[in-house]
Amino acid sequence: MMIRYCAHCVMPDTKPDLRLDEHGVCNACRSYEMRNEVDWDSRYKSLLDILDKYRNKGGTNWDCIVPVSGGKDSTYQVVRMLQLGLNPLCVTSTTCDLTEIGRKNIENIKQLGVDYIEVSPNPVVRAKMNRIGLMQVGDISWPEHVGIFTIPVRAAVQFNVPLIVWGENSQNEYGGPAAAAENNVLDRRWLEEFGGLLGMRVTDLLGMEGIEQKHLINYTYPTDAELARVGVTGLFLGHYIPWDGLSNALIAQANGFTTYHKTVEGSMVSYENLDNYQTGIHDYFKFLKFGFGRATDLACLHIRRGRLSRLDGLDAVKRLDGRFPWEYLGKGLEDILRPLDVTVDEFIKICDRFTNKKLFQRDSAGGLLKDRHGNLKKINDDNIP
């Protein structure tokens, strides 16, 4: 087996839902090319019409809900809504292991001048869910991926605010089925197919490690009847305004957002994934399963926008992607795993269990080859002539 890579960016064909066309170009690159055909002025007008439709004319309720993490994108979303004269209710589902810089950026969003609600799910139950996610589907952040979608929608129902303004459609930005990439709304169907549940339903957790229905309230999507009563709808802001993570970061920084003091581990920038100490583990498991990590994602985004050559992107990926996550944002792996009651040795065994061994170099006995830091080496880093 050889890994095939997009001829334009550096994304491998091992990425779920990614396709290479007859020219060897991936669907994410093709989606980006199609942005040149978009009438962005018309889309922006459509956005203004939608926002005006849902604006609370009497000032008796919020105009919309903006799900926020405190990251660059959600900071940008809040800034943009305020610029458009809306009165948003900002809703945060806290990360599984909130960082100091993450807390600082959450407080910064509040200071932009918004009403803000923070939901912190039961940490004892969440640690159990982290452990289950890690052991069952190889995703320590599984409960967070559920909560960031369910909690804002539950708030929309609870506070009778129909419109939810999300950020990007990841299927468009990172590659996915064409129909999903062109979708401009986030609903139950999108969540179930593309929300990162990895085939495990919330109800599957019942009975695991003592988890009961009462522990899963925050992770349960509202019923269709509840959604219909309020008329909840969610739009992707990136469908109406050209979406660019770097531009978002610059705008966020101009509005008080704090970046890390160096390149984030496993990444190639200092301005994203700053709110959860577990993110390094999450990104590493993506590398183990599919042969690419966050540095690949970022290199591809910058290549498509003409900021990075493919050659330089390949070099960055080789140096930065897939490093064993001994620490993240200065916190050691042992400390990150402690709430899950998982040792580093146990973690390494879990890593090996979820590694797609076809993608990595092995010895004559079939064992994974690792360097002295525990890092793996892919079978090929680019297309072979």
Image (cartoon, helix red, strand yellow):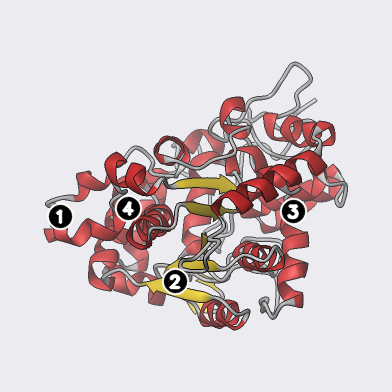
Whether residues under marks 4 and 3 lie with C-beta atoms below 8 angstroms apart, the answer is no
Q: Which badge, 1 or 2, comes first in the chain's sequence?
A: 1
Q: Amino acid at mark 4?
A: Gly
Looking at the image, tell me whether mark 4 or mark 2 is earlier in sequence order.
4
- With respect to residue 149, does 380 lie above or below? above
**Residue at coordinates 63% horizontally, 25% vertically from top-left?**
19
| Residue 203 percent location from the top left of the image | 21, 45
> Which circle marks residue 213 in the picture?
1
Distance CA(mark 1)–CA(mark 2): 31 Å
> Which numbered marker is on residue 133?
4
- Horizontal relation, residue 48 to residue 128: left or right: right
On the image, numbered disc 3 is attached to which residue? 244
Q: Nearer the viewer, mark 1 or mark 2?
A: 1
Quarter in which the C terminus is drawn: top right
Compared with 10, 4 (above or below) is above
Can residue 284 be seen? Answer: no
Q: The N terminus is located in which quarter?
A: top right
| Badge 1 element | helix
> Dot 3, crowdedness within 10 Å: few (<14), some or many (≥20)?
some
Provide the residue designation for mark 2: 333
Tell me if residue 360 comes above or below residue 71 in the rendering: above
Quarter of the image where one finds residue 210:
bottom left
* Residue nearest the observer in this picture, 276 or 184: 184
Q: How far across and how far down the image is residue 89, in percent? A: 49, 68
Where residue 155 sits in the image (x, y, percent)? 37, 61
Foreground: disc 4 or disc 2: 4
Element assignment for label 2: helix
Q: Which residue appears at 72% of the width and 77% of the height?
A: 255
